[in-house]
Amino acid sequence: MTFFKGESLFSFFFRKQVVFGELDFSNLISSSGKLYIKPKALIGRRGYLGNVRDDDLMSLLEQNEIIRKQTTLFSDPTYHLGTIKRYFYHHDFPNNFGFDRDGTKGLAYCQVCIAENIYRNGIGYFKYEWLKRGKCTRHNTPLLFVSRSTRAKTVEALTAVISGRVPEGSVKSVTQDITATSVPPTRHQGYMSRMDYFHSFLTKDSPVRMTMCLARDFYLWIKSNVDKLNDDIARKLRFDNKERLLSSFHNYRHQYEKLGYGRLACFFFIFLDMDDRDFRKFLDEVSKEIDVFFGVYSPRSLSEKMLKSNRYNCSLCPRADWSKSCPASQTIIRSRVYYPVVAGSGRNMRVITEGSFSQLTPEKVAFYVSKYPESRCLVYDKKAEPYLGRFLGWSENCSSEFVDEDFHIDIPLLSGSK
């Protein structure tokens, strides 16, 4: 494991930077010697992080209460990739950590916990809870607090603490626990509009994740099974009766309106709680469980399961709007539909997509291949004008398994190419 249970993000970065000799601690400690509660990695120097897996980074952010892994009905499993990039890799973020006045805290620790960690692991580390509270919840004792006025002096004190020594000037902490600032409600207590009620189901924990194509099939199933709707279901949806509910399906021209995802989620949980036989049959016959792979630098370092519609082939998805927003497109659609069809040789190498030609350099082709190593590449005879009749076969990872060696395209910058 690359981090310890309960370890703070600050502690993880500090240990890594000390080991790798990265002695610029401006990302961890303010100029006045305070610790940043939610620090970020040193910009442009990700090497000191080592070969840390994306799932470990996500777990570290989760135990530091930066993210909350939650499975909701229409949630995107790739949602937290942006947070991983922000804290560890700084993709598309300026060189500005943006800490507010409550983003720092003085050095506080539990001496008994540090001693136990050194005994078990050979090194001490700082827990996230010490950045929030004034006492140790494990031993129910006040934390020791060390006040330092500069970054360099705080680093000296930190090094002493994790090695088991007590820095000079350590006193029992009297700092109060950090609590969230209460925000006054904008509406009177207990009030929730119908739209807010629908929206609440979008944040409700769900046993499955549903893709856009299956959501559309579910909407069509509801339309074809309106006889299942009754006054009881209408009241659960905040309507007076079934007639009011059915009228909400139409616009002022009496045309069917597209149901929002909030209402679809509400219907889903209602039929799920009812254990409706036809609803179960619909899921069994129409849906299919797939694995969605994604990651920051490795496209398959993380995976989540989703339910998709059997009626649609992801590699031939007819809906461009789905391919832009559907989580499954993170690997399935882009790696199959937009994976290049290669033709030509040398600097004249071309990539063919959807029947059109686009001139690309060998370096760009190599980038495509290295980005989607699990997919397949179409290989054409590079001595002739490429068209469907001259298609030679599939090439796994650009090897010549299915094609003549004479027709294999040598793609530079790609390890393992022949």
Image (cartoon, helix red, strand yellow):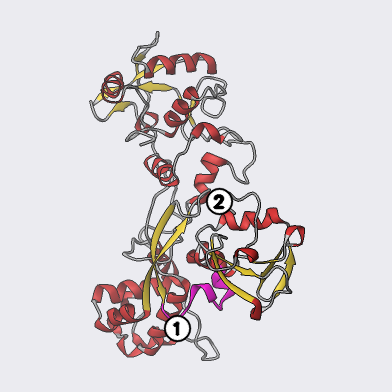
- Residue depth check, mark 1 versus mark 2: number of the one nearer the observer: 2
Range of residues picked out in magenta: 310-323
The amino acid at mark 2 is Gly
| Residue 315 within the segment the image draws in magenta | yes
Q: Badge 1 is on which residue?
A: 248
- Kindly tell me whether residue 273 is visible in this rendering: yes
Closer to the camera, 256 or 45?
A: 45
| Residue 32 within the segment the image draws in magenta | no
Residue 211 image label: none
* The residue positioned farthest toward the top in the image shown: 168
Q: Position of residue 161 (x, y in %)?
A: 38, 17
The amino acid at mark 1 is Ser
Closer to the camera, 373 or 122?
A: 373
Q: Badge 2 is on which residue?
A: 416
- Please name the residue shown 45% across and 15% down the image: 147
* Residue 383 falls in image quadrant: bottom right
